[in-house]
Image (spheres, rainbow, N blue to C red):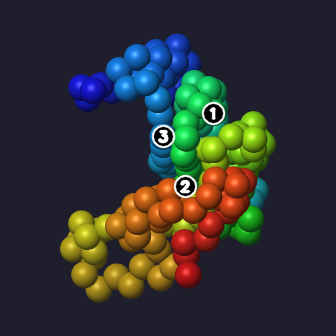
């Protein structure tokens, strides 16, 4: 499949992508929704609802489009996995991070609904929890940085791959914490 940019905010474009994947490959065994961004304020009272609008589109609307388009394909997979990367903030929000935490919590609820839709299949919808992600370029940019609690992107990739080593019924609807 050739590389093609798809606007995940365009429901029809995402559906066309799913249809094209099905035509070209016959199935889907994995979807990783790794669309993110962070917005927040210094305090609860200074929270901007414009930040909510931005995060709603980035974290929730894109997830809705992708999951709705790919759920039928995952349902037919012999070992499908749908994964979102969430954050501890969804369960432990800070005052200044209200919009971010609320958007992550909504994304988790949506994913748990997808898990319910997949419960009688060989596929699973799973939430991977991180504080934040770190990579070699970030470490090189800040060589004295400690990045406490951050998850290395290589560890995230290994965790995603490891989901295929466990039965769908064991994973479906779970939150796996990668922060420790």
At 40% across and 61% down in the image, what residue appears?
157
At 45% across and 71% down in the image, what residue appears?
151
Residue 51 can be seen, yes or no = no
At 21% across and 74% down in the image, what residue appears?
140
Asked if marks 2 and 1 touch (Cβ < 8 Å), the reply is no
As drawn, 39 above or below 23: below
- Give the secondary structure at mark 2: strand
Query: Of the residues tagged 2 and 1, which is closer to the observer?
Result: 1
Which one is earlier in the sequence, the residue at label 1 or at label 3? 3
As drawn, 80 above or below 139: above
Give the quarter of the figure containing the C terminus: bottom right
Which disc, if any, is residue 85? Answer: 2
- Residue bearing the label numbered 3: 29
**Picture coordinates of residue 9, whole percent (x, y):** 52, 25
Residue 30 can be seen, yes or no = yes
Which one is earlier in the sequence, the residue at label 2 or at label 1? 1
- Residue bearing the label numbered 1: 75
Q: Nearer the viewer, residue 162 or 31?
A: 162
- Give the secondary structure at mark 1: helix
Q: In which quarter of the image is residue 135?
A: bottom left
**Picture coordinates of residue 67, whole percent (x, y):** 60, 33
Q: Residues within 10 Å of mark 3 (few under 14, many from 20)?
A: some
**Picture coordinates of residue 14, whole percent (x, y):** 49, 22
Which one is earlier in the sequence, the residue at label 3 or at label 2? 3
- Distance of label 3 from label 2 (alpha carbons): 17 Å
Q: Nearer the viewer, residue 106 or 100?
A: 106
- Distance of label 2 from label 1 (alpha carbons): 21 Å
As drawn, 65 above or below 172: above
């Amino acid at each position: 499949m050739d590389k093609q940019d798809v606007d995940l905010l365009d429901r029809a474009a995402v559906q066309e992508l799913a249809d094209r994947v099905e035509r070209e490959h016959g199935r889907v065994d994995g979807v990783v929704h790794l669309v993110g961004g962070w917005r927040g304020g210094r305090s609860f009272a200074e929270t901007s609802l414009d930040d909510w609008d931005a995060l709603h589109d980035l974290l929730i609307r894109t997830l809705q489009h992708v999951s709705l388009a790919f759920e039928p394909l995952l349902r037919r997979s012999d070992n499908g996995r749908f994964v979102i990367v969430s954050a501890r903030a969804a369960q432990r929000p800070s005052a200044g991070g209200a919009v971010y935490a609320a958007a992550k919590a909504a994304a988790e609820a949506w994913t748990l609904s997808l898990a319910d839709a997949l419960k009688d299949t060989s596929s699973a919808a799973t939430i991977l929890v991180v504080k934040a992600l770190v990579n070699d370029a970030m470490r090189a940019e800040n060589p004295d940085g400690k990045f406490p609690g951050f998850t290395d992107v290589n560890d995230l990739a290994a965790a995603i791959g490891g989901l295929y080593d466990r039965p769908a019924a064991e994973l479906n609807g779970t939150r796996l914490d990668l922060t420790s």
